[in-house]
Amino acid sequence: MGEKGLKQAGIEEYALDARLLLEETCSTSRSDLFAHGDRQVGQEQCERYLRLIDKRKRHIPLQHILGCQEFMGLKFKVTPDVLIPRQDTETLVEEVMRILRDGMRILDLCTGSGCILLSLLKYSNSCQGVGSDLSKKALLVARENARSLSLSAEFVQSDLFENIEGKFEIIVSNPPYIPSGEIPLLMEEVRDHDPLMALDGGGDGLYFYREIIKRADRYLYPGGRLFFEIGCKQGAQVSSLMEKAGYGEITVYQDLSGLDRVVTGIYIG
Ligand code: GLN
């Protein structure tokens, strides 16, 4: 019943979404559904399920209906005030993890839900993390995520480096990078439900890379590394911005679909 409605509404992953909404309604897991597939659902649960299906039919993202998203095997709270964590961004976290050593200081610019910084802290020992975002509402979500994962990180309201002090071994960012003119072409779930300020990278999509690269040298220790997530066509441009600013060992990495997704370089000092 739910599946059909979602399919008719043009929801691509209609079967998966219907199952996850059913599991949410009944507080069950996939294996429960397999083992007790014939169990009856009460009237109240049925109505709740249909309300959730109705929301999804209106293209409200599943993550906003469920209130969470898994990222790097961890559960993150998600609200309309933060970008929904994407699987592509796990590539960025994994690349940082390759060079992350105990005790390093990490700065995550445009932290949103905090998913990048908090995953890095979860999978390392005694690193110190600072996350910054322009949005106060996003920072409330990031702090709540830190609490629920039992991690301590400092979250600072800041326009990029504006209120940031000290130096770091690692600066990481998944900044807004969609060229403004392409925003109307995004799928409805993203265009109408992710925060615009988390998507819009200015006319050519590169505004935040320019701003961050311009000032990152003052916040990196010599030998420190800058890591960016990028749009799949931005590898050459972001690499060239870093090269002009004097970074070394500039490398582009691909995501699981084979698309350019991460650029990193070393601050020589
Ligand atoms: N750092 C957050 C994430 O990757 C938010 C990114 C953003 O708002 N552009 O999910």
Image (cartoon, rainbow, N blue to C red):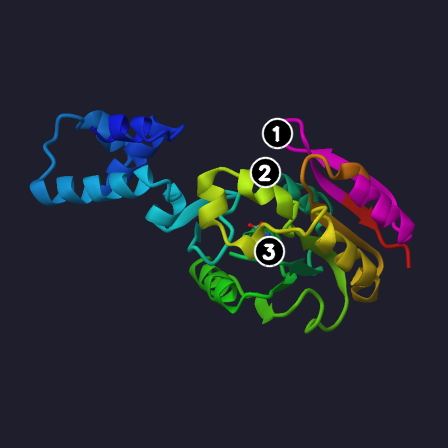
Task: Classify 10 Å Cα crowding around label 1: few (below 14), some (14-19), many (20 and above).
Answer: few
Horizontal relation, residue 207 to residue 38: left or right: right
Tag 2 and tag 1, C-beta contact below 8 Å? yes
Q: Which amino acid lies under the numbered mark 3 shown in the image of this protein?
A: Leu
Q: Quadrant of the C terminus?
A: bottom right
Task: Classify 10 Å Cα crowding around label 2: few (below 14), some (14-19), many (20 and above).
Answer: some
Label of residue 46 in the image: none
- Given residues 204 and 137, the one toward you in this image is 204
In the rendered image, residue 2, in percent from the top left (x then y), is placed at 23, 31
- Given residues 264 and 186, the one toward you in this image is 186
Which residue in the protein does label 1 denote?
256
Which residue in the protein does label 3 denote?
117
For residue 212, which quarter of the picture? bottom right
Q: Is residue 118 visible?
A: no
- What's the residue at 53%, 39% (across, down)? 186
Which residue in the protein does label 2 denote?
88
- What's the residue at 71%, 41% (across, down)? 262
Q: For ligand 1, tell me if the residue under mark 3 lies within 8 Å.
A: yes
Which secondary structure, mark 3? Answer: helix
Q: Which amino acid lies under the numbered mark 2 shown in the image of this protein?
A: Asp
Q: Is residue 42 above or below residue 161?
A: above
- Given residues 27 and 8, the one toward you in this image is 8
- Disc 2 to disc 1, C-alpha distance: 7 Å
- Disc 3 to disc 2, C-alpha distance: 15 Å
Q: For ligand 1, tell me if the residue under mark 1 lies within 8 Å.
A: no
Q: Is residue 257 visible?
A: yes
